[in-house]
Image (tube, rainbow, N blue to C red):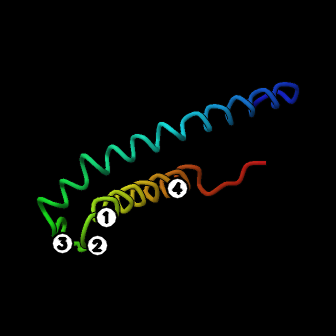
Amino acid sequence: MIPLELQGRAFSLKYAIQSGVIPVGMLLGGLLAEFVFEPLVARCPDFIGISLAKGSSAGVGLMFLITGVIGTIISITGILKTGGTQYE
C-alpha cells in the first residue's frame, strides 16, 4: 500500500515507465514480425493447421494470435489466483 502523500509521485513514475516502454514494445514487435513470424509462415504456410491470412501479413496475424492467447492465459491466471476479489 502506498502512503497517501506519496501516491502522486508513485503513480507518475508508473505512468512514465509505461510510456517509456511503449516504443520499445513497438520496436520489438516489428522486429519479431519481420524476422521471426513472417519467415516462419513463409516456410510453413499451414503452421499449426491454421490459415490466418494469405500474403505478406500472415506472420503478423500469427504474432497477434500468440500474444492474444498469452494475454488471455495471464489474465485468467491472475483472476483465479486472487479468487476474483476486488480491491478497494
The residue located at (51%, 39%) in the rendering is: 23
- Relative image position of residue 26 (x, y in whole percent): 46, 44
Judging by the rendered image, the residue that carries numbered circle 4 is 80
What residue sits right under mark 1 in the picture? 57
Q: Secondary structure at mark 4?
A: helix
Closest to the observer, 5 or 84? 5
Q: Residue at x 82, y 31 (%)?
A: 8
Q: Are marks 2 and 3 in contact (CB under 8 Å)?
A: no
For residue 7, which quarter of the picture? top right
Position of residue 29 in the picture relative to residue 34 (left or right): right
- Is there CB contact under 8 Å for labels 1 and 2? yes
Q: CA distance from mark 4 to mark 3?
A: 30 Å
Q: Amino acid at mark 1?
A: Ser
Q: Which mark is residue 19?
A: none
Comparing labels 4 and 2, the label whose residue is closer to the camera: 2
Element assignment for label 1: loop
